[in-house]
Amino acid sequence: MDINKATQRYEAWLRSNLPVVIEADLEYKHQQMADAVFPFFRATFYRWAQRVAQLLPEFDSAPVVLSVGDIHVENYGTWRDADGRLVWGINDFDESTPLSYPGDLVRLATSAALATGEQKLALHPRESADAIIAGYHDGIVRGGGPFVLAERHIRLRRLVTGELRDPVRFWTKMQALPEASLAVYPPEAVDAAVTALPEHGADGGASIRSRRAGLGSLGRPRVVALAPWQGGAVAREVKAILPSAWSWARNDPSPTIHYAEVLDRAVRCRDPHTAVHNRWLVRRLAPDCVRVELADLPAVRDEAALLGWMGFELANVHLGTADVRSSIVEDLAGRPPGWLLSAAERMADDTRDDWRTWRS
């Protein structure tokens, strides 16, 4: 099965499992997939789920953890915890599922290699892989720890908040979102977004907007409730969630959504406004509650340190699986030098082949 057939079958699965599919967003996704290999990689976790087991069977016997699944170098962001502190970490768990722990490491390293190929990163793939595995090992051995961007993570705070999104520009962009057609978007999604607003947006009626964001989740219904509240604007987003594409690739007859589970179990300071209600993810949108993309970072930056922190944060997620710490440390110790780079290069080459097929 090539990438074209895989995409057709996966999107048919989407249509059979969602209350509505936003077809214009799928068309936009296809265009983004053709533009460059890095956005293609971000948009096609379903294909990764098909190919990684075929190309890397040596990892099947490694310890299994509740994984991120669709981890990559632009799946990190910031949010505010219950005490108002700014926190950094993994931003999205749409594809979370139990997998052998090396799978997330390989995907993160593959994304870094592809980003380097498109000059989004300057590190050689070997340096990226070394930094990721060093940070991950450190996180596992130390038992993890949240990234609260205050006195303990000054360098990271300066890196990801040096040009924190301007609030005026952010809210101008939110106000420019198109009005959502209530004939298209499910009433339960709209109700969930409005209910999540503080006092239901009591300072004025909420407006319901549609939003196109991300790549892998394009096509899923996504709405934003926008309202004035106590002198400023507030926004809550609702997005449809599904079982991981890993379940689709394995023809799992009883797939499970793991989003709420991974939020509950990971070593992190949670955003109190992020929650799962039935098959809808509800979260706050704000200038400092956003994904941080590579283009948002300063031109002068310590990329090795950043990838090390990404690896450490990945350990924070994996440590949510009970009694796995010692087995991962033992498994890592038994792996040969360069194993992560070798696996990432195989997957990067396979992704490039798929991308060329998609463009042809």
Image: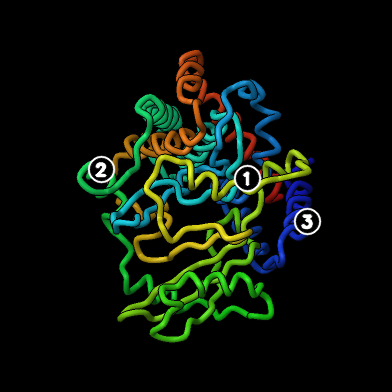
Q: Position of residue 259 (x, y in %)?
A: 56, 49
Report the number of numbered marks.
3
- Residue at the outermost bottom position: 204
* Distance from the alpha carbon under mark 3 to that under mark 2: 44 Å
Between 214 and 19, which is closer to the camera in this rendering? 19
Residue drawn at x 31%, y 67% as measured from the top left: 166
In primary-sequence order, the first of circles 2 and 1 is 1
Q: Which residue is mark 1?
A: 45
Q: Residue at x 55, y 51 (%)?
A: 39
Vertical placement of 170 versus 329: above or below? below
Placement of 28 over or under 127, stated as above or below = below
Colouring of the image? rainbow
Indicate the position of residue 134 as horizontal and vertical percent values: 38, 26
Q: Earlier in the sequence, mark 3 or mark 2?
A: 3
**Mark 2 nearby-residue class (10 Å; few <14, some 14–19, many ≥20):** few
Circle 2 residue: 153
